[in-house]
Amino acid sequence: MVIKRVSETDDRAGLFINEAFTDYAIKSNVKLNFEEYCFAAENDEGEIIGVITGRAYYNEVHIGDLIIDEKYRRLRLGSELVKKVEEEYSGKGFEKITLTTFGFQAPEFYKKLGYSLEFVREDKDPKLSKYFYSKAI
């Protein structure tokens, strides 16, 4: 046996993950509902100025990454991208959207969007404390 680092985009690894999780969900009598997503906002020149990514699985949708170009922050673009995810997955059998963010990132932003704080994993450096949020959809 050899253990080595491979890219997540390695087709063999992706196929193995998909098949293994699907089989395990079936054996556990749970619907997998797996889907990765990525929504991008573009400016008038077609340049990407914001992106939100994540995964939907089982009964939840998880926001993995949300980033907005600094020049376009405070224009509600982040709110619109989160809203897009909420709209995309509402009414499709998913119960909630989950996410994590660090103290230096956007804890207050998600509260303003109606996300409930479930837990804070405190760190010696408050900027690196990790906030866990969810919102029913």
Image (cartoon, rainbow, N blue to C red):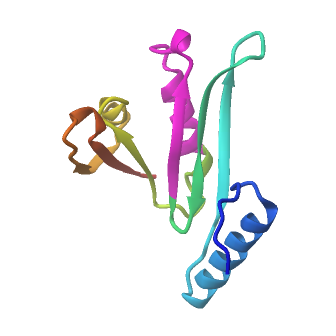
Where is residue 83 drawn, in percent x and y? 52, 36
Q: Farthest residue in the right direction?
A: 11
Q: Farthest residue in the bottom direction?
A: 27
Quarter of the figure with residue 29: bottom right
User: Where 52 falls versus 29 (above or below)?
Assistant: above
Q: Which residue is drawn at 22% across and 36% down?
A: 125
Where is residue 87 drawn, in percent x and y? 57, 43
Q: Residue at x 73, y 64 (%)?
A: 14
| Residue 9 located within the stretch drawn in magenta | no
Magenta range is 61-87
Left or right: residue 40 compared with residue 117: right
Please tell me which residue lies in front, 27 or 112. 27
Please tell me which residue lies in front, 83 or 121. 121
Quadrant in which the N terminus is drawn: bottom right
Left or right: residue 57 compared with residue 47: left
Q: Residue at x 32, y 29 (%)?
A: 104
Q: Total label count? A: 0
Please tell me which residue lies in front, 12 or 41. 12
Quarter of the figure with residue 31: bottom right
| Residue 83 located within the stretch drawn in magenta | yes
Quarter of the figure with residue 114: top left
Please tell me which residue lies in front, 82 or 53. 53
Where is residue 91 drawn, in percent x and y? 57, 56
Q: Which residue is drawn at 51% across and 14% down?
A: 70
